[in-house]
Image: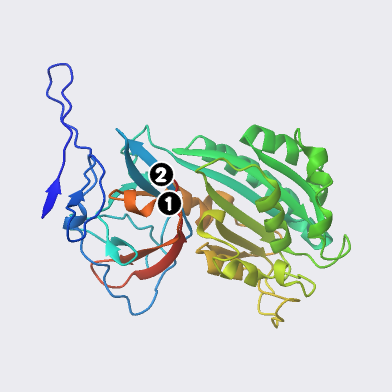
Amino acid sequence: MKKSFYLFCFACAGMLFTSTALTSCSSDDDQEEVTVLVAGIPDDGDATPNPNIDNNTTNIPNIVCNTEYENGVPVIRIDMTGVQESLGNEWLRLYGTGSDKQNVWVEVDGKPKGISVRNTADDNDGNTKVMADLVFLVDNSGSMSEEADAIARDITTWSEMLSESGLDMRFGVVGYDGAITGALNITTADKLAEYLNYSYGINRTYHFGGLDAYALSTAVEPYRTGGYSSNECGTAALRFADEQFTFRNGANRIYVNFTDEPNQPAGSNGFSVEYVSTQENWNTAKGTIHTVYSDTYKDFMERPYYYEYPWRMSEYTGGTIIYCDPYFSNVTLSNLPVTGAMQNSYIIRFTNVANLMDGNTHDVKVTILTPDGKTMAEKTFSVTFAS
């Protein structure tokens, strides 16, 4: 037998109806299954299984899972940056359970979930903003001298623009050149601009800023992959930020790696691009990595653990990639794919999760399939639901 429980709320004699729920255990032979309902989130009974996908024609980025409560009822919120349609020209609007335009499905441990979707680009809920902590990983080796000032200028302008958009943004930066040569922890766009305007050229990111500048400067040695003019390694900079920065709880972590060199981990597995290829090392909450590669010479011979394609970090985490010339000409960051990815973020919500909040890892499978069948993607994340 299946039961549903509802909580009715009446306010100001206006008979405002809100459906929330009382939680209970799932059933076996002597227990009743209880359907948990929250306003605006479709019932799991209305959900259909994820469609079968033959192959991915686009990427699903890493996600952030958080637990929210509505009148005491736990709701899982998935924050996800944008997904491009198969030709890479448009950003998808996602539609959830019950919509005649449904194009995204979610299963947890193989069970379909009733999901609601908020598209940030629709600006349909001014009180609900996607939080994002954006970290710039900047190769400041000598070969980056041509584009260093242009990159810094555009980072400043772009950060200010994002801060004024419908996103709740904070920023950080790591400079690298065979070692971590500079850093600024998560902060505001204004503080980021102050940091970058400290000097000029590649020296803009050759110092440590902020109240914890000394602590950051003394934490760099384990991330060294060579001298100050060799073995540029974006993965080492990535791990430095991941392990040393103070990210906001619940914020999407987004990285943009600016480089004109291969990723050079000097034989270290831990600093190889392959480090982010598995959820054992780089779980879904650690973030999505985007790449800006400013060199026309991108077809070099790859040598794993020594001379790697830096954009593989984007491929593994669902990030975007752009190639430009060594002078960063005819490119502005506001036109980069990562901008669209953030401005077209999604909030996906589902409930009936009390039995999932057990401290164990669960498989969350997200499937996207457009009605025309051309854009399809699927990705499974390992998630532990917090109580």
Residue 273 lies, in percent from the top left, at: 65, 70
User: What amino acid type is highlighted by mark number 1?
Assistant: Phe
Relative depth, front residue between 241 and 126: 241
Residue 156 lies, in percent from the top left, at: 64, 41
**Left or right relative to 192: residue 111:** left
Element carrying mark 1? loop
| Residue denoted by label 2 | 67
Residue 321 lies, in percent from the top left, at: 56, 64
Residue 76 drawn above or below residue 318: above
Mark 2–mark 1 Cα distance, whole angstroms, equals: 7 Å
Choose the circle earlier in sequence order: 2 or 1: 2
Residue at (18, 27) in percent of width and height: 9
Q: Evaluate if marks 2 and 1 touch, with contact meaning CB atoms under 8 Å apart.
A: yes
Element carrying mark 2? strand
Residue at (66, 44) in percent of width and height: 172
Disc sitting over residue 385 in the figure: 1
Residue at (72, 42) in percent of width and height: 184
Specify the quadrant that holds the C terminus. Answer: top left
Residue 370 seen from this side? yes
Residue 247 drawn above or below residue 312: above
Q: Quadrant of residue 327?
A: bottom right
